[in-house]
Amino acid sequence: MTSLDPVRHVVLLEELDAGGVRVVTSGGASAVAREPRGIRLADVPADQVDELVTRLLDAAPESSAIEGEGEVAERFANAWAVAVGKQVEERGGVRLYRLGRLRIPDVQGEARPAGKGDADLCAGWLTEMEQDEDARRGWTVARSADEDERVRVMIAQGRLWMLEAGGRPVAMAAHRPPQRGVVRLGPIYTPPEFRRRGYGAALTALVARNLQPAEVCLRTDLGNPHSHGVYQQLGFETVADLRRFQLSSID
């Protein structure tokens, strides 16, 4: 079975750990499917698309979201839509970054691990962040139904951090469990009243430094240009752009 690149395919590895199903063609093209997240494509040559669709019909026939790179992602999405009798629409995308040389900004504040007493605040911030993202995109991403539990797990595992300034929390940043020496940052959030002061960038950099020497990566929405500039200033370098497609019933 073809191995997955731990940086380029970090989300696929996370989905596998969460119970996703990996499908591989005879030529080595692969994808991981997990509901409600949908299908994530790995390295898929154009001539392997049809076979991959056929194999996924057996493994994940209900999947209605697709994410992958370049023209082959569009080709797969169109073929999948035909196979399941639905229509498909492209819905933005994300950019994957890996950390190069880290640059830590000079911002006032103190980073600390989140504790049990932060759970309600962080769960509220997480909900606000997701609502902001959905409003910016104009559509809703399928997510876990229990954000409170998600926050509790991150806190218990030491994966959620807070930045305090002036005696109060002003930003949060988390990271996912390591995947073959690679750690993906996120979610990262600064409430509106504390933005444009560098808090989120500073916390991101401090958490990234704590995670080294692991390779650190993150993803950000292509529709949010401000975040790209921030992460590039910290030393993050582009790995790939991924396109997203969503299926819906034919009217």
Image (tube, rainbow, N blue to C red):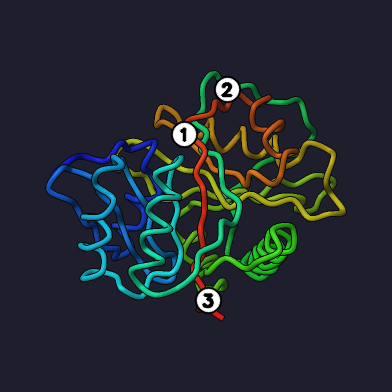
- SS for dot 2: loop
Which quadrant would the N terminus be assigned to in this image?
A: top left
Where residue 141 sits, quadrant-wise, is bottom right
In front of the other: 85 or 19? 85
| Residue 128 appears in the figure | yes
Kindly report the distance in space between the C-alpha atoms of the residues bearing marks 3 and 2: 34 Å
Whole-number angstrom distance, CA of label 2 to CA of label 1: 10 Å
Helix, strand or loop status at disc 3 = loop
Q: Which of 215 and 77 is in front in this view?
A: 77
In the figure, 24 relative to 237: above or below?
below
Q: Where residue 93 sits: x, y (%)?
A: 57, 48
Residue lying furthest top: 101
Q: Which residue in the structure is indicated by mark 2?
A: 102
**Which SS class for mark 1?**
strand
- Quarter of the image that includes the C terminus: bottom right
Q: Residue 146 carries which label?
A: 3
Q: Name the residue under label 1.
A: 216
Q: Which residue is drawn at 39% across and 75% down?
A: 85
Q: Residue at x 47, y 34 (%)?
A: 216
Horizontally, is 84 left or right of 90 in the view? left
Q: Circle 2: is it few (<14), some (14-19), or many (20+) Cα within 10 Å?
A: some
Q: Which of marks 2 and 1 is nearer the N terminus?
A: 2
Lower position in the chain sequence, tag 1 or tag 3: 3
Question: Quick one: label 3, few (<14), some, or many (20+) residues within 10 Å?
Answer: few
